[in-house]
Image (cartoon, rainbow, N blue to C red):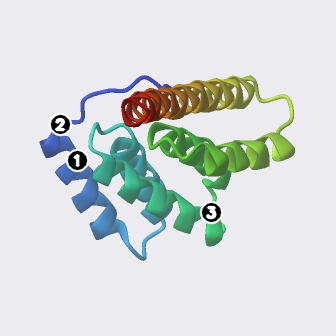
Amino acid sequence: MHHETASVDSEKLQQLKTAYEESVGSPEEDDKRFEYAAVLINSESAEDKTRGVAHLKEMIATGSPNARDSHYLLALGLCRLREYTPARDSIKRLLWLEPENRQAKDLLNKIEEDARKENLIRIGIVGGIGLAIGTVLSVLISRTRK
């Protein structure tokens, strides 16, 4: 599976949505829904990614024949939405089914690396805020002692 962020053409998105909606109830429904979800996941819009994630979760829950690929794509979509814990859970389910899946292992590493980076940024922000508050308090305290 390809996991670079690609710009999604709104016309293509609409074509895939229509193809999926027209396939509901037919033998092609799962494949069309999977294709539509894949394009949503690759969108730059968080709203589209969220809709893609919802489609994939439902496909997995209903036992879609595309469930294994759906776990990978779901993990990728969740990672792109910065929902690292559920992304990690999804890719680990795929690795439980396919322990030697190299692509899934690579995605798990990316998820864990992105989560670590985000945590370091949060720690830095909290530390910076704490330092700023401490500085302001020390200035205020020194002024009240004069």
Q: Residues within 10 Å of mark 2 (few under 14, many from 20)?
A: few
Q: Residues within 10 Å of mark 1 (few under 14, many from 20)?
A: some
Q: Secondary structure at mark 3?
A: helix
Q: Which residue is rendered at x = 30% and y = 39% of the image?
A: 43
Asked if 60 appears above or below 111 in the picture, the reply is below
Nearer the observer, 41 or 112: 112
Residue 15, given in percent of the width and then of the height, sits at 20, 51
The reply, left or right, for residue 61 in relation to residue 12 is right
Corner quadrant of residue 142: top left
Q: CA distance from mark 1 to mark 3?
A: 22 Å
Mark 1 residue type: Leu
Residue 22, given in percent of the width and then of the height, sits at 28, 68
Determine which residue is flagged by label 1: 13
Asked if 58 appears above or below 109 in the picture, the reply is below
Determine which residue is flagged by label 2: 9
Determine which residue is flagged by label 3: 60
From the image, which quarter does the N terminus lie in?
A: top right
Mark 3 residue type: Ile
Question: Which of the two discs, 3 and 2, labels the residue nearer the N terminus?
Answer: 2
Residue 1 visible at all: no
The reply, left or right, for residue 104 in relation to residue 83 is right
Corner quadrant of residue 91: top right
Residue 80, given in percent of the width and then of the height, sits at 46, 37
Question: Which of the two discs, 1 and 3, labels the residue nearer the N terminus?
Answer: 1
Residue 75 visible at all: yes
Residue, far left: 11
